Amino acid sequence: MKESWQLMTIRGIPLLVHPSWFLILALATLAFQEQYRSLGDGAGALSWALGFTTALLLFVSVLLHELGHSLVALRQGVKVRSITLFLLGGVARVERECSTALGSLMVAAAGPLVSLVLAGLLLASVHPADHVSPLLGRMVAQLGSLNLVLALFNLLPGLPLDGGLILKALVWHWTGSQRQGTRVAATSGRVLALLAIGLGSLLFLRGGGIGGLWLVLLGWFGLGASRQQSQMLALQKALTDLRVHEAASRRFRVLEQDRPLRDLSRLRLHESEGPSDWVLVCSQGRWKGYVDDAPLRDLPVQRWDSDRVADHLRPLSDLSSISAQAPLWQAALALEQAAGGRLLVLGPAGLPEGTLERFELSERVLRQIGLKLPPPLIKAARQQNTYPLGLSLAQVAQGMVTSGLVSPQADPQGAPS
């Protein structure tokens, strides 16, 4: 939600407003105004003022709901990046998930609990407020009922709702598997979303109007969120199951150390577009190091025939490397630290057997989950050495580490601990 505007900061958490929020604020104001006018609780400007105030206080309730999540997340050591109000309510963006099932359960339950407390306090205040003013009493009753609906709706057991996060945490606690919790909650969310779309369509066809369309919109949003969760699970599984050697290529050339620099120049002349291949140096079948292009840049052309590759050797240890048996999530993290975004792949004996770059890693992962990229997209990613489709596998891998799905000390020869 990069186009959101920041209103203020609460406990260090930026409060953002998405442009779509103004649309729902206007629609809510209109709905409440019509309600007050039809009940005779206000006329003209007064009904509009009551409608706007009720709509605004409803979103204050939504903000308090999200603050409940955020403050508990902070207590669990999880940084909250922002709270955004938008078309479908509010969302708190956190830096990572809690690393424990209990912590996730507490964060997920905090929002509905805040809404239930608000509903109880408001409904208990209806009678005193009615004595002050019937209009105030009706507004308090309205807000109390809406907070109760907000709490109960969010407790439905399907992602991305709070109830889905609670279900995920409970399954995670019972089974010991965070992935299993996500899988169960995402499936439940998909079922609920389809039911919402079906029920909303039926209501609309039977004259339910905006209520039916709103239910369809919520279901569609839930279906998209469930699909994203499923895709994330597939990416995480691929990054865990696949090994570096399954994605590696051979983006290096080999020169004997006694060859002249002129041979290095010829290699470069015959290269295609994109990042240059590494040039590894050997002697009688033994690896000696590598040579870069610095001699070609720094020395006069006249010396290219007299100088030997061995005169400009650099140790292989200067190149960022990774074991061929390491899982791809480790490679995704290592690529972010590697100069030039390339890793030297080392075999069991610690000898070079290939290279790995971002586009190769992403192509293999996407192929694993059944997505084949078109050749032009692959070519562009190869030339730029980037992830296609804006896919940042490093962020996915980092999220796996911070949420405890994998351990940074995992054995590269086997599955992560």
Image (cartoon, helix red, strand yellow):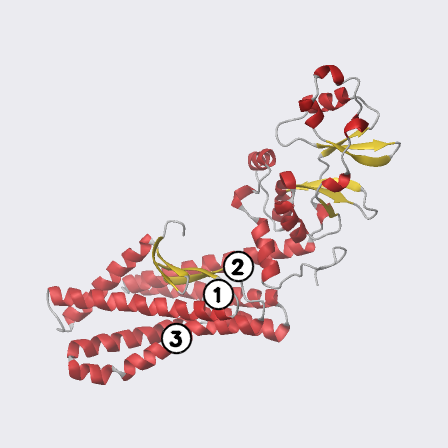
Which residue is found at the position 27% from the left and 68% from the top? 57
Q: Quadrant of residue 207?
A: bottom left
Query: Few, some or many C-alpha atoms within 10 Å of disc 3 (few <14, some 14-19, many ≥20)?
Result: many
User: Which of the two labelled residues, at mark 3 and mark 2, occupies the earlier sequence position?
Assistant: 3
Q: Quadrant of the C terminus?
A: bottom right
Which mark is on residue 229? 2
Vertical arrangement, residue 251 with respect to residue 163, above or below: above
User: Which of the two labelled residues, at mark 1 and mark 3, occupies the earlier sequence position?
Assistant: 3
Where disc 3 sits, the SS reads: helix
Residue 19 in sight in this render: yes
Between 278 and 174, the one nearer to me in the picture = 278
Query: Few, some or many C-alpha atoms within 10 Å of disc 2 (few <14, some 14-19, many ≥20)?
Result: many
User: Which of the two labelled residues, at mark 1 and mark 2, occupies the earlier sequence position?
Assistant: 1
The residue under label 1 is which amino acid type? Leu
Between 263 and 203, the one nearer to me in the picture = 263
Q: Quadrant of residue 124?
A: bottom left
**Mark 3, residue position:** 114
Image marks 1 and 2: residues in contact by CB distance under 8 Å:
yes
Q: CA distance from mark 1 to mark 2?
A: 8 Å
The residue under label 3 is which amino acid type? Val
Which residue is found at the position 71% from the left and 48% from the top? 244
Vertical arrangement, residue 195 with respect to residue 366, above or below: below
Nearer to us of marks 1 and 3 is: 3
Between 147 and 104, the one nearer to me in the picture = 104
Task: Report x, y in % for residue 223.
Answer: 46, 59
The residue under label 2 is which amino acid type? Gln
Query: Few, some or many C-alpha atoms within 10 Å of disc 1 (few <14, some 14-19, many ≥20)?
Result: many
Where disc 2 sits, the SS reads: helix
Q: CA distance from mark 1 to mark 3?
A: 19 Å
Task: Report x, y in % for residue 130.
Answer: 18, 82
**Mark 1, residue position:** 159
- Looking at the image, residue 157 sits to the left or right of residue 344; the answer is left
